[in-house]
Amino acid sequence: MNKLIFTLLLSFSLTIAYSQTPCENGSAGGYPCNQVDFYSHIDNATLAGTSGVEGSDIWGWTDPQSGIEYALMAQTNGTVFIELSDPANPTIVGRLPSHNNKSSAWRDVKVYNNFAFIVADNNSGHGMQVFDLSKLRNVTNPPQNFVADARYTGVSSAHNVVINPSKGLAYIVGARGASNGCGEGGLHIVNISNPLNPTYAGCFDADGYTHDAQVVTYSGPDQTYVGKQIAFNSNENTITIADVSDPSNTSLISKEGYSASAYTHQSWVTEDHRYLISNDELDEINGLVDNTRTLIWDIQDLDNPTLIREYFSDRVAIDHNLYVHDNVIFQSNYQNGVVMLDAKKVGSTNIRELGYFDTFPQGDNTSFNGSWSNYPFFESGILIISDIDNGFFAVKPNIKDVITSHPEFVSCENPTTLNVNTDDQFEVSEYQWQLFDGAHFNDIQDNNTYDGVNSDELTITNESDNLNGSEYRCKVTISTGEIVYSYASNGYQSPPIADFDISLMGNTVTLTNNSTGAQSFEWDFGDESALSSENSTSHSYAECGSYTITLTASSACGNTSLSKEITITKPVSHFSYAVIQEEDESITFSFISDVQNANSILWDFGDGNTSIEENPIHTYSSNGQYEVKLTTSNTCGDSIYTEVLDLDLILSSKNILEQNLKVFPNPFNTELKIEALDNSYELNLIEIYNAAGAKIEQIKAANRTSISTAHWKEGLYLLVFTDIEGRKAVKRVVKE
């Protein structure tokens, strides 16, 4: 009903709406809101000077001479420049038409060194426009029609452009018709240190198409990458992290997918570079999730990004662009407008909504209408918003610190109480406690479990297993109708459950903590060494033997312990091999060790060459017989395995077996099929290795074998086949 009322009000509004209006009782300037004040609005037709135009991206620029802030708003037919010296009375300074006046629904703009850089997707021949923003100072008769000052033609069209303000480089993503061999739609890197003469600098396309990205000079906790240029890419189905410090020699650091993914759209790092906030543009519209989903990643180890929380909005909409500034996440969620989330406790996965401004009161659905993007970085605090249908908005967050102390779990006693305290200067009109169901917070009512659900103190009187670890928050409404949410807190919790996994390599054990409900830990390694209080840890044993490892997990509600035994023994050497290349008289082998607990490895290939790699590749320059010896060792001793390679016999066997093997489909997805075409050759074993050379599976094979690969990650795999006569062959396959 509220959406209908707002829509009716807007139908009588002017194309340009001015004057600051505070958000009260859920409305400001005729738009739904919470803790965000309205300043001004200009519709798309007025911005463009013509009808039939839609909005897309938006960015900002502050004139270093005057301090005046400007909005740079992209539309289907070009870019509009809006002066904001008085954000309640903005001025359209001028317009830069699209190159060759071609229309594009996807136009993106960024700023470097007082120049704007503009790209357009599905717009052949557009390239990247460059515009000198200092021209905006001297406009005497606005709006003025501008022309671009330069244009980069190393791409034909592109979806987006990314700029790290501390470096003179632009990163064009989603490019079409790219030159210089950078044609996968990844990061097409351009030197813009001289904005009027942009030149190609390098490429990152090791993970294919990039939809959007952020590039930072890294200053986070991962010491390996401090000071380097790190790109955080949204690559359709993964978060992909790359080192782009040297544009001519970029490298993939890591990539990670997530469940219920539909289209990894965009992401932004927190200001301490510890966490990454990302979104998926199609998970809502495809019905994979109910409400708008925000994904929180721990990136303190860039080589191993970890998804730590999925935050769900109370409303339904598709999410689009988001940014992080001053510990606030600003999300353009299409038909919901801009939603602001508190990022202060994002590391502990405690997220709360701070406010919102709905630029599209016509509806709240999973449709591509409403807020495309926003820009929250102005020093004035003004937030500018672009809306596909409704144009330009200038608003200002007015977040009130109503809650002075948040609910906090303090004991395990029955009953349990949670409290919220508020500042006396605000008149509270309503308290409502809510319970988290795993995706959303829902109102609770007074009953035999809860008391005081509409007060500042909630009492939980009936503790039960189904409430163990449950989260609660308080929704506080003040007299102006504005809503403030507390941080969430556990209400009831049973003693923790200790659990861990063991990985043994030589005499060193790696212990992965899987405990739940614990606040502290104690590891006893069983060898009278010092105890450890780390979460997950590793330990090296000085002597061989059997040891009992005990983990004690503790919380305010008690502690539990779990013990597991390990035995440190000397390694048992063994290896397999496969021919991977034949050239003239040289033959190249891939050797793969099959040793689980060695500290050191030494290969002797029998031709005077050695290696200490775990899985080396070695080339023999001539045929003959070679004795290959693998020596492995740890604290407990050495182990030697020797095998004689007769290259003539191996090659003839390999060719026979390879010719009678069919592996399909290749590339594959969830299943891989193997078929021996001649039943006179009987398969015995299939060993599967990933691109790093680690054996991931070993299968006792028949002549017709089907392998489930749904759990394999994307990438290259090596299949080593052995038949019952000991003949070997190798096949390379790729999972998409």
Image: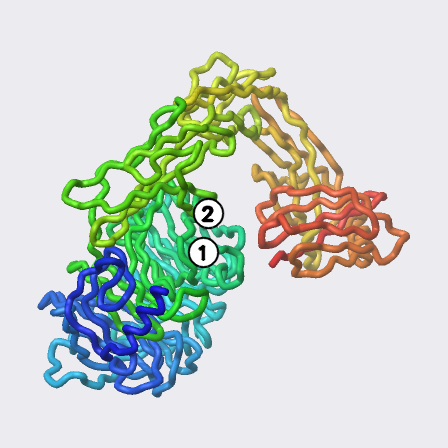
Left or right: residue 315 versus residue 63 is: right
- Of 486 and 602, nearer the camera is 486
Task: Give 105 or 475, whichever is nearer the viewer.
Answer: 475
Q: Give amino acid for label 2.
A: Ala
How far from the left and from the top, in percent, is residue 401? Answer: 20, 45
- Name the foreground residue: 11 vs 323: 11
Kindly identify which numbered label has been placed on residue 291. Answer: 1
Q: Give the farthest residue toward the front.
A: 447
Q: Quadrant of the N terminus?
A: bottom left
In the picture shown, does residue 513 fall above or below 33? above
**Residue 84 sits in which quadrant?**
bottom left
Crowd rating for badge 2 (residues with CA inside 10 Å; few <14, some 14–19, many 20+)? some
Q: Are marks 1 and 2 in contact (CB under 8 Å)?
A: yes
Q: In terms of secondary structure, where does tag 2 sit?
A: loop
Q: Which residue is mark 2?
A: 439
| CA distance separating discs 1 and 2 | 9 Å
Q: Which of disc 2 and disc 1 is earlier in sequence? A: 1
| Kind of residue indicated by mark 1 | Asn
Q: Nearer the viewer, residue 167 or 714?
A: 714
